[in-house]
Amino acid sequence: ETGVTQTPRHLVMGMTNKKSLKCEQHLGHNAMYWYKQSAKKPLELMFVYNFKEQTENNSVPSRFSPECPNSSHLFLHLHTLQPEDSALYLCASSQDRDSPLHFGNGTRLTVT
Amino acid sequence: GENVEQHPSTLSVQEGDSAVIKCTYSDSASNYFPWYKQELGKRPQLIIDIRSNVGEKKDQRIAVTLNKTAKHFSLHITETQPEDSAVYFCAASMGSTLGRLYFGRGTQLTVWP
């Protein structure tokens, strides 16, 4: 069983909706990440948090807003998304910035 | 071009045969190279990784080789089994920071019984 839990597993939302993705890790890690996985494209790093501080925003549109209240929880707030934002959103954690990633099962997002 | 190129995109082998997936990278500062396996509808899982001070690493039926001069690394699976069927991703660290990875596009491996 994964030590990184993501909810919901599936989400369908309209372009005017506001929703949030949640990630929780039970591994005692200090770094957390959001990745986007689209068909036929490489996994794309979106955000990195290290000790609750955002250390990277990989040129992600402002309609995606991350939040990391503590080292165990990570959120991705979604607002006025576009159909091309439909993808699998993966959360990951690592012990620190120089350790292997552990992924959650992802949230399959469909924007209609 | 992409930071990490992975080939082939699809690979079909007979059970018991070997499978090889190759990746090249462009960032000369990369020093960590993990491989992930992703089964349909599941999360990517780390299966093996290698750091730049090592040329080869083996774990049972899985091995990875690294050629830093040529900037390429490969995954070798021997005695393949149907349960090896999945998408395999290679990755290379962005400089020296391991958590920030460039990923390849993935290889769909199918092992026929």
Image (cartoon, coloured by chain):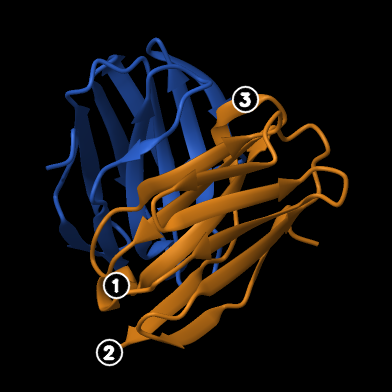
Chain colours: A blue, B orange
Q: Nearer the viewer, mark 3 or mark 1?
A: 3
Secondary structure at numbered mark 3? strand
Residue A52 location in percent, x, y?
Answer: 37, 13
Q: Residue at x 29, y 57 (%)?
A: A16
Q: Residues within 10 Å of mark 2 (few under 14, many from 20)?
A: few
Q: Nearer the viewer, residue A75 or B40?
A: B40
The amino acid marked with disc number 3 is: Thr
The residue carrying mark 1 is: A112
Secondary structure at numbered mark 2? loop
Secondary structure at numbered mark 1? loop
Q: Measure the alpha-carbon separation of dots 3 and 1.
A: 36 Å
Q: Residue at x 56, y 59 (%)?
A: B75
Label 3 chain ID: B
Q: Quadrant of residue B9?
A: bottom right
Q: Residues within 10 Å of mark 3 (few under 14, many from 20)?
A: some
Q: For this view, does B15 lie left or right of residue A5? A: right
Q: Nearer the viewer, mark 2 or mark 3?
A: 2
Q: Which mark is residue B113?
A: 2
Q: Nearer the viewer, residue B74 or B103?
A: B74
The amino acid marked with disc number 1 is: Thr
The residue carrying mark 3 is: B97
Q: For this view, does B22 lie left or right of residue A97? A: right
Same chain for the residues under marks 3 and 1 in the image: no
Label 2 chain ID: B
Say if B100 sits above or below B45 in the image: above
